[in-house]
Image (cartoon, rainbow, N blue to C red):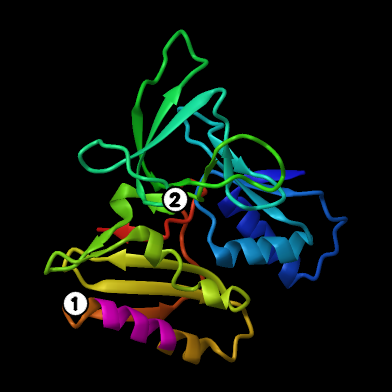
Amino acid sequence: MAHGYVGALDALSDHIIENNIKLKPPKVIWSTASPISVVQEAKISKAFNASVCDQYGCSEIYFVAAECSHKQGMHIFSDSVKVEILDESDKPVPAGEYGKIVLTNLNDFCFPLIRYENGDMGRLLDKKCSCGLSLPLMDKVRGRVSDNIVLPDGTVLAGEYLTTIFDDYASEVRQFQIVQHRSADISVRVVFQKYSPDAPEIINRVQKELQHRIRGQVNLEIEIVDSIPELRGKLQFIVRE
């Protein structure tokens, strides 16, 4: 098994692909520390020739949930942590609806964290995994509560939507980041694979999609860059200045 931060696995995958390095495939790649995009997952799987399973946790409660090889959701380790999904009024939301993640550590008796709001957004899944495990399921974490972009008229572009805008172009796009400046204008930074003849068409499609949602309220710029700086080994998909 190869276990690592998404950012580290992403960078290592770039090196493997660019240098045509052949590795003996591990049984699984286990990614952690930050949400993994469809773009990153496809690239990491290609580089290592192995399935990528996501793991969710935080510094305070490391093991919260993880995917199995069936990849039908993330199994919550409910014997050691209670996961709740709440709305802005701190009321539980139905399975399938996004809300803020609230955690209770069930096995720390010295300094327990009870109904700890860690700032992440997620949702519970109302189904069972075909692998046979009885552990409840949650969806992949789409981002933090602060990842939403707010337009001048109050329209919210949710982080769980913004992190998927390049999902259809996983083989072409290496990295991306969305920045909302203090002026409320929005910049999208995109790193393409070295040889991507479809880059102009991809930019055009994404720009049309975002312009439709922005409705002319702020300026939108999509910029092709060579790299995007990471923060403490993690790529921030959404930045609000």
The disc placed on residue 17 is: none
Residue beneath disc 2: 231
Quadrant of the snapshot with the N terminus: top right
Query: Rounded to the nearest whole Å, what is the CA distance between mark 1 and mark 2?
Result: 27 Å
Q: Is residue 114 left or right of residue 153?
A: right
View extreme (left): residue:
153
Q: Which amino acid does label 1 sit on?
A: Val
Q: Locate residue 71, reporting x and y percent.
A: 65, 53
Question: In which image quadrant can residue 52 be found?
Answer: bottom right
If you read the primary sequence from the N terminus, does the residue marked by circle 1 or circle 2 appear first? Answer: 1
Q: Residue at x 28, y 82 (%)?
A: 211
Q: Answer above or below: position of 13 versus 210.
A: above
Count of labels shown? Answer: 2
Mark 1 or 2, closer to the camera: 1
Q: Answer above or below: position of 92 versus 42.
A: above
Q: Residue at x 26, y 65 (%)?
A: 180
Q: Is residue 39 left or right of residue 84?
A: right
Which stretch did the figure color magenta? 205-213
* Disc 2 element: loop
Q: Locate residue 170, reporting x and y percent.
A: 59, 73
Q: Which amino acid does label 2 sit on?
A: Leu
Residue beneath disc 1: 218
Is 211 within the magenta? yes
